[in-house]
Amino acid sequence: MNDLLHKLVSTAITGALIALVGYLSVTVRRRRVAREEAAAPAPVEDPTQALLRQAQQLDVSRDELAIQGRQAEALARAGEAADAWRALTRARPGRFQAERRAALVRLSELLVAEGQEQQAAQVRQEATGLS
């Protein structure tokens, strides 16, 4: 009986020690990974991503101002949005053509609403050239 009790206690202690070593090993690994991640340089954001967010925000702002009847402000915002989309198509040739075209069409509509027909025609011509 003494031998059986000794084996049971020995097995329980061995199992507990194995579990403790495993736990400590995982904890040490997690801390090492956390230190490595903290020391790693921050990922560099593609500069066009910030410009893309800006262009999208300008589009939304332009439309909100137009809905509110603030046509002059909407026109100014439409010009800024068109410039942002132009910059994006220069930075990423072949991309954002549809968005640029849509921004130009919206700009031309606002120009017509403000009685600036000649400028609207120039903007429409630029939009047509993107097709």
Image (cartoon, rainbow, N blue to C red):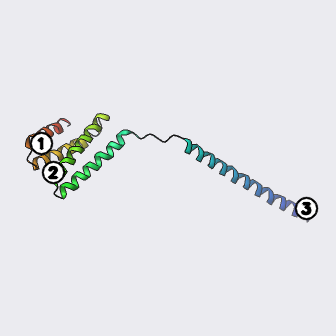
Marks 3/1: CA–CA distance? 98 Å
The answer to whether residue 58 is above or below residue 8 is: above
- Which residue lies at the image location 80% right of the left edge and 56% below the top edge? 14
In-image side of 94 versus 23 (left or right): left
Q: Give the numbered dot on residue 120.
A: 1
Q: Residues within 10 Å of mark 1 (few under 14, many from 20)?
A: many
Of mark 1 and mark 2, the one earlier in the sequence is 2
- Which residue bears the numbered disc 3? 3
- Which residue bears the numbered disc 2? 72
- Which residue lies at the image location 15% right of the left edge and 51% below the top edge? 72
Of mark 3 and mark 2, the one earlier in the sequence is 3
- Disc 3 is placed on an element classified as helix
In-image side of 16 versus 90 (left or right): right
Decide which of 120, 80 is in the foreground and name it: 80
Q: Quadrant of the N terminus?
A: bottom right
Point out residue 7 in the picture as x, y percentages from the top left corner.
Answer: 86, 59
Of mark 3 and mark 1, the one earlier in the sequence is 3
Q: Of the residues shown, which amino acid type is indicated by label 3? A: Asp
For the question of whether residue 65 can be seen, the reply is yes
